[in-house]
Image (tube, rainbow, N blue to C red):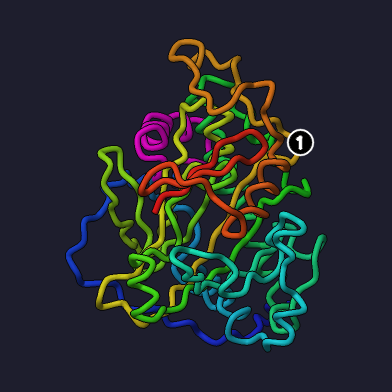
Amino acid sequence: MPAPTIPYAPHYVPAPATKEELEWAELPIIDFSAASTPEGRAALVPQVCNAMQTYGFMYLVNHGLTQAQNDRIFDIADIPFSQVPEDEMKRYTADIKGTGSYRGFKPREVWIIDNGVRDQLEHYNTHRSITELQSHPKALRPFLPEMRAFTEYNHEKILHPILQILARGLELPEDTFVKMHGFDDQSETYLRFMKYYPRTDEDEQKSKNVWLKGHTDIGTVTILWSQPVSALQILCPDGKWRWIKHIDNAIVVNIGDGMEFLSGGFYKGTIHRVRQPPRDQQGYPRLGVFYFGSANGDVLLKPLQESPVLQRVGIVRRFDDEKAPTMDQFRKGRTAAYGLSELTKKSDVVEEQMIHNVPVRHYN
């Protein structure tokens, strides 16, 4: 039989990697090739769990997709921003505040960053099923089968093994977290294509070069496909902001609040931010591909007290168990409020808001 025809997508050419000497975060690099077997996952437990306890971030390499497949998904990721007319973009714009969902487009200048400066990023979000819960702009439709294959791969070959390893680290049955992350659930585990655009010098000065304030992610596990424009920083255990280095065809993985709550603080939702790139990359856009893992919508975000590990080391709570929100409540509340609601200033660098009895902090 003839091979299926792959639709044409203009090739996206990213910026060259920076040559500047930056202070890089020394994150663990995990060889993920062994994660497909129970024995391999067991062997990865010490490395992965130490990374998620210490940094909340790690790199994965040898995850099964080639550089060519990686390049292809970035070509597709640019379609919503470069090939969709503005009037059609508006028709597919998400009602973020009204629905607490990012499905569809988020245009630029929706969020206030600092001192009246608004964001310069667009993103396009789709539920992992791709076509079951939303429709898409015409230019993106030829690529929907490839997007579906990509979300399935992220969910089953990357997210699930990570969840299995994290469960083993808590000495829980390996499928504990997997059961909470059904592919067919309508919760907001979603694929995001995101593009940052350069800002004016005036806006950079007003916002202290911060493009997205320091925050923790909403869900359980975030999967970020590495790209060469350096802008992501994490707040390291010693209190210093350090840059995340680009590694070709690698994945950057971090823990979100959902997993921190479920693990009783054993795994850390690390604070991270996006700032102006180094000098030799300024003027370039920054295109990103993400897979945001969240637990099923009805999962209560309270510690799994049956964990023998938590029984030994204790539980760190940010709210009482009886006030625990569901994943859906927490996600919708944070999504609807982010960048669109008043924050309480706690210090010169920390602002706070309450989302379903949970204190959520932002760092500037």
Q: Nearer the viewer, residue 68 or 302?
A: 302
Q: Nearer the viewer, residue 97 or 71?
A: 97
**Label 1 is placed on what type of residue?**
Asp
Q: Nearer the viewer, residue 168 or 302?
A: 302
Pinpoint residue 362: horizontal percent, then vertical percent: 47, 48
The outermost residue toward the left is: 21
Pinpoint residue 71: horizontal percent, then vertical percent: 48, 73
Pinpoint residue 327: horizontal percent, then vertical percent: 69, 39
- Residue at disc 1, secondary structure: loop
Q: Which residues are magenta?
A: 34-57
How many numbered circles does the render carry? 1
Q: Nearer the viewer, residue 161 or 138?
A: 138
Q: Is residue 204 visible?
A: yes
Q: Name the quadrant containing residue 95.
A: bottom right
The outermost residue toward the top is: 312
Q: Which residue is mark 1?
A: 298
Q: Is residue 211 above or below residue 14?
A: above
Say which quadrant the N terminus sits in: bottom right
Residue at (51, 71) in percent of width and height:
118
Q: Is residue 61 visible?
A: no
